[in-house]
Image (tube, rainbow, N blue to C red):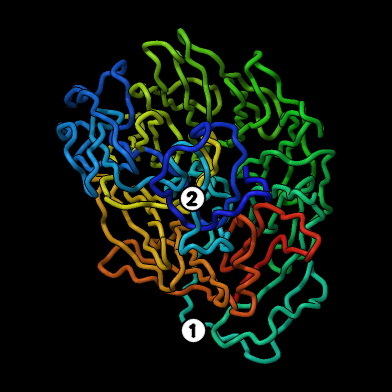
Amino acid sequence: MTQPPSQPPHGGFGAPQDRPPQGGGFGAPQPPPAQGGFGAPQGAPGMPGGPGIPSAPPPPAQPPAAPPQPPQPGYGHPQQPGPYGAPTAPGTPGPYGYPQQPGPYGTAPQPGFGHPQQPPYPGAPGAAPGGRPRAKTALIIGSAVAALLVIGGTVYAVTSGDGGGRKKPVAQQSDDPKPSVSGSPSASRGGGDDPEDLNAGRKAGEAKVLWYNSAPDAPGSGADAPGMWVTGKTVVKPAYEQVFAYGVGDGKPAWSPITFPQKICAVTPQKSADDKVVVAYMSGSGDKAECNQLQQIDLDTGRKGWSGKLDRHGAFDIQVEINLSVSGRTLMVGSGEAGTAYDIDSGKKLYEKGKYGASCYPVGYAGGAGRLIQASSCAAYAPNEHDEIQELDPATGRVKWSRPLKKGWSVTKVYSLDPLVVYLTNQDKKVWNISTFTKDGAFRSQVKVDEKFAPRCGFLDRELQGCQGVAADADTLYLPTDSTSSANEIVAISLVTGKAKWRAKSPADEPMSPLKVQSGKLVAYVQPSYDTGGQVVSIPTAGSSHAPAKLLQNPQGTAEIEDTFYDSVVDWADGRFFISAGRLSGSDQSKEKLIMAFGN
């Protein structure tokens, strides 16, 4: 969820600063500050092998976990080789002078950098890269998948397809686009006239504004506009109490807006194979209202399918915040200490996940790429307290494998589902860890790069699919570094060794973040400045040269509009770049844009 407009935006790729934890820590239901740009969750531990708890013995070939080490300040990412290697002696300074912290599986994560952008355990988004509070460009990779969103999709992380039948866009490299300098066609406003003439003065080599649409009225306090889905026919955008659909090429209304009786409170980050999504909205407007009303929608036709009310599972099933995930034909709705699975096409309840074992219960889900990941909490406040990560069969709920974590470690975000890349945090020790796992749940590797990374993640701790600005393929994880001044880098990290394979620097003095991997190239978005439009670039993933090549240069004339989209979400599909607001300001001073499309 985005933060109330009353709080200052944090923009961009910023990374957390060294500061004490803020109220409630990760996942505490505190009012989130404004999020802008490609920020990232902060304060998560970098984890080798993950915070595994001794109760699940490691594979026979692996040595036992090392004893815990004293906590360390600042950001930490595992610098120790291998999750099962002997940790550095307590107090041994890591890079930047901090002692190293043992990771979830006995490895020593480094205090330094490498975690997403939220401060250690406050859950607030990081500062804007380059210190530009207005740059609020966040990236959502369209029907992205899996977890990370976010987290990844089949072979791609937060940025690949949802496994769902959507035609994968093919990036067409164009180093020399040649739009006409004069007599350029006007952008279409909702398929009609363009009184603003957004293409006036467009320079040679710049893309066109293909179309744009204005945002609906919103309360003065602002309103959420979560997500955006792109199909072969439509771009569908939720905003406040409505869902809008536009033709991908001309921006004309594809079907009549769907209006709900109350505000939208959650959406599926990805769509199903047959272009279905589910939107949740509030049961009322009062203090006791819950996020428990579900509505299925066909993205191509706008037809409203099944609808229903989410069942309550016990007194602790608080449905103020819920998370929705899609894997195959299964919709998983997580709330409180339970999960309910539905057939996304029919609405039929498939199964429920609740308390299991002596004292374990589910706290979050990530779905996509044919996989469904469940994070659980066990024996809270007991000596054997710990968290677990499990993979479920999406169709039946059967547990395929389960991996306990060491006490104090939690699954905070899923960066990719296939391959499975998980971001874990240790709230007490203020450290984080990024680990990867095999198909059967065995530890594979951990990130060992001394860097401060800045993917952008939602502020809710258990919203596992809340990260954008990260991508992955079968053997490589792509993460953006933080930018405290201007340009940053994308680091390609081997999922075999955990080490950096190569780096690519932003071609402009603005942060760059991964969008998706396709056709052997990493597609990335370079944020705009006040007077320079954003860029879509491609970076070869193989070979010796990883210099970004420009696919699209957005016009200078609309740079300010592009730069000020509030908490924006972006996508690149079939040679078109889409950007939409993630939150509406509710300001009466000017009519804000809801969505814009660029192309050559």
- Which tag, 2 or 1, sits closer to the chain's start? 2
* Vertical side of 274 occupied by 68: above or below: above
User: Would you say residue 196 is visible in this rendering?
Assistant: yes
Q: In the displayed image of the protein, which residue is found farthest to the bottom?
A: 182
User: At numbered mark 2, what does the secondary structure look like: helix, strand or loop?
Assistant: loop
User: At numbered mark 1, what does the secondary structure look like: helix, strand or loop?
Assistant: loop
**Placement of the N terminus among the 4 image quadrants:** top right
Instruction: Please give the name of the residue rendered at 79% of the width and 66% of the height, measured from the top-left corner.
Output: 190
In whole angstroms, how far apart are the C-alphas of marks 2 and 1?
Answer: 36 Å
Q: Position of residue 338 (x, y in %)?
A: 59, 20
Q: In the displayed image of the protein, which residue is found farthest to the front?
A: 20
Name the residue nearer the viewer: 184 or 162: 184
In-image side of 109 versus 240 (left or right): left
In-image side of 90 versus 294 (left or right): left
Provide the residue designation for mark 1: 176
User: Would you say residue 573 is visible in this rendering?
Assistant: no
Q: Amino acid at mark 2?
A: Gly
Frontmost of labels 2 and 1 is: 2
Q: Residues within 10 Å of mark 1 (few under 14, many from 20)?
A: few
| Res. 333 image quadrant | top right
Instruction: Please give the name of the residue rendered at 53% of the width and 82% of the height, measured from the top-left corner.
Output: 177
Q: Position of residue 189 (x, y in %)?
A: 78, 70
- Numbered badge on residue 126: 2
Q: Position of residue 296 (x, y in %)?
A: 73, 38
